[in-house]
Structure formats: C-alpha cells, structure tokens
Amino acid sequence: MIKVLIVDDSASVRTLFVEMFKREEDFEVVGCAEDGYSAVRMVRDLKPDVVTMDVNLPDCDGFRVTRMIMEENPVPIVIVSAIYRASDAEIGFRLIDTGALAFHNKPALKSEDFADQMQDIIVSARLMSEVRVVRRKIRFSKDSAPKVVDPVASAIQPELPSAKGKVVCVGASTGGPQAIKEILMTLPKEFPAPVLVVQHMSEGFTKGMVSWLKNNTGHDIRIASQNDKLIPGVVYFAPEGIHMEVSANKRIVLTDAPKVNGIKPSASILFNSVACNIGSSAVGVLLTGMGRDGADGLLEIRRNGGYTIAQDKESSIVFGMPGEAVKIGAAKSVLPLDNIGGELCRIFLGLLEDK
C-alpha cells in the first residue's frame, strides 16, 4: 500500500482528497494536516510514502514546509495548489528548488475536467511515491549564475556526433522542468540554435514555468506564437493545449489538432515536423516523463538523419518516455541528465566551425 499524507488548510479539500484516494486500492491515507508544522510532525511520525501539499498554509508557506521536510525526513512531495495567475504558478516551480517533485493545479469541484484532473494527481502521487529522495540542505542565492560549459573544453572532447544540428527539439513530462532547467544552465546564452520544447504541463503553469526558467538560467525563453521565426539562442515552449510544429522555412506552426497519445501539445507532433522539415540538421532530445509520447517522433528524426538523445533511467524521475524511445531504437545516445547539455554544446560548437 502507498501511504499518502494530505496537507491542505481547507477542510473540504482534505475531505475530498481523502475520499478520492480511498477509492484507489493501492493507497492508504495515513493522515491529514491543516498547517505546515503539523505536516512536518506527521511526516516524521507517520512516515508516508508521498505527500500532497498546498502552497498556502496558515502558519508557514510551502517553501519553508518543504525545506524542513527535505532536510529532516525527506519524502516525495507533490504540490497541489490553486493557480489564478502566472505568479502563483511560478511559486510552484520555485518549490522544485526546495525538493518538491511535481505540481498540479487544484481541481475545481464543478469543473468539467475535475475527474481527469484528480486522476492526474493520483497518478502523479503513485509515480512519485517510487522516487528515491535524499536528505538535502537547501541554500538559496539570488545571484546564482548558470553553470555554462567551457567552450574550449567542449570543443576538444572526442567523438563529436556527425549531425551538425540547426534546431534542437525537446520533449518532457513528469520531472521535465527540473531537467530542462539543468540543461539550459549548461548552455551558453549565445547558443547557436533555436530550442523548441514540448513540456506536458497542468493547465495554468506554463507562464510561471517560463518566468522561473528565465530567472534561473538567463536565457531568452518564450511561449511560442503562430509564425514565429526561429532565432538562434531563443527557447520556445509550446502553448498550453496547442500542438507546436516547425515549417520548412523554420517558422512556428501552431495547430488545434486532436490529442496524440492522449496529450496536447504532443512531443511526437513536434518531432515529426522537425524530422520532415529539418531532417539531418535536427537534434531531438527526449527527457523524463510518463507515457510514450515523443518516442515514435524521435525515431523519425533519427531515420531522417538527425541526432537523437534520450535521458537515461538512473537520472530520470520517470523513465517512461525515454524508455520507450530506447526500446524502439530511437535514441542514438542514452545519457545521464548532467551530460546532455555538454553533448549539445559539442554538437553546436561543431556547427560554429562551419560558419
């Protein structure tokens, strides 16, 4: 049984979550906490396998609670909080830096999507309960600088991939924001190619994610718009609920087509368009995430002469998407997360030599 602790200051929300988790045969609700200090104490005493936690608590905010839990009795934490504006969403991403693993918008009871949103939270809690977390001492610095790879060191590393990429496309789901942040912090700001990203995301979080990544990496990061011209060094995220593709003349195409693999936006849609229109000048990267979205598209990029990378199992929070890519031979390289940024630098420093 998966032991879950529910943390929320609303009695009605706690009651609702207890009822929803009790319907799942593999979950046991071991307790409910209405404030932060109670949450810390109950994590220590009840030893849950996973915690669902609101950000706004009456005695202390989610940052302090998460930090105390991760320093004293580390456990997987899934943030579930109401998002009304981009600044609310950014708080959820900042919690990643304190140790939270995933986050979801708190579903509204009268919402048409309530059942689906609640099921997403349950699936996330189930997956996160299996993640090994470690005790961590959190240090914050407003002036923390990105860890950019030394161009000279990167240029002299052996076995430069044969593909000289002109576009990087990235797909990610559960655990993706953390992974994308780490990769971007490795890339120089003058990175000589556009980067296009499909990140599976709960509704309302995309703007907050972009703001969080901008503040942490210093890169030019945008939510893509129709017909955007691809600019080297710019990172484009697919908008919520819209598929993103790339045209032959290297412009963004946004479409309202049906879901693919139950997902919208879909990494497979992006990858397939890149394979078709960019071909051997493309680099595809598939990161941590549940499901199989992006695996077939990554294979198409490889079949069309592009260079493909999948995150390895050991560094993935969930090895679903990259694992599926590995199974079908879609990945030219399978790399730990902390090597992916360096690999991209090697590829694109090779590109600089051609100019």
Image: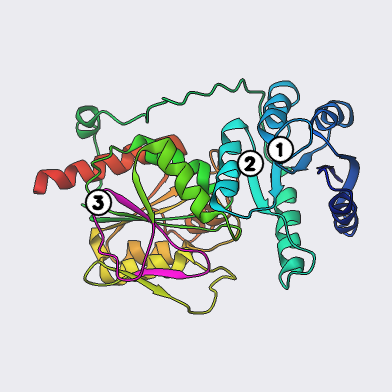
Q: Which residues are magenta?
A: 223-245
- Residue 302 horizontal/vertical position (percent): 34, 61
Rendered residue at 64%/53% (across/down): 83
Specify few, some or many for label 1: CA neighbours under 10 Å numbering under 14, 14-19, or 20 or more.
many
Above or below residue 213? Residue 157 is: above
Density class for disc 2 (Cα within 10 Å; few <14, some 14-19, many ≥20) is many
Give left or right: position of 111 versus 89: right
User: Residue at (27%, 48%) from the top-left corner?
Assistant: 233
Does dot 3 land on a helix, a strand or a loop? loop
The amino acid pointed to by label 2 is Leu
Mark number, residue 193:
3
Please name the residue that numbered disc 1 is placed on: 76
Asked if one can make out residue 211 in the rendered structure from this viewpoint, the answer is: yes
**To which residue does mark 2 refer?**
101
Asked if one can make out residue 311 in the rendered structure from this viewpoint, the answer is: no
Q: CA distance from mark 3 to mark 1?
A: 36 Å
Determine whether, in the image, residue 110 is placed left or right of residue 281. Answer: right
For the point 46% across and 46% down, the residue is: 211
Distance between the Cα atoms at labels 2 and 3? 30 Å
Looking at numbered disc 3 in the image, what kind of residue is underneath it?
Ala
Q: Are marks 2 and 3 in contact (CB under 8 Å)?
A: no
State the CA–CA distance, disc 1 to disc 2: 6 Å
Task: Point out residue 312 in the picture as x, y percentages from the top left corner.
Answer: 50, 43
Residue 66: x and y in percent read: 69, 31
Judge by depth and name the residue closer to the eye, 97 or 340. 97
Does the magenta stretch mainly form a helix, a strand or a loop? loop
Q: Is residue 271 magenta?
A: no
Is residue 142 rendered to the left or right of residue 249? right
Q: Amino acid at mark 1?
A: Pro
Quick check: marks 1 and 2 in contact, CB under 8 Å?
yes
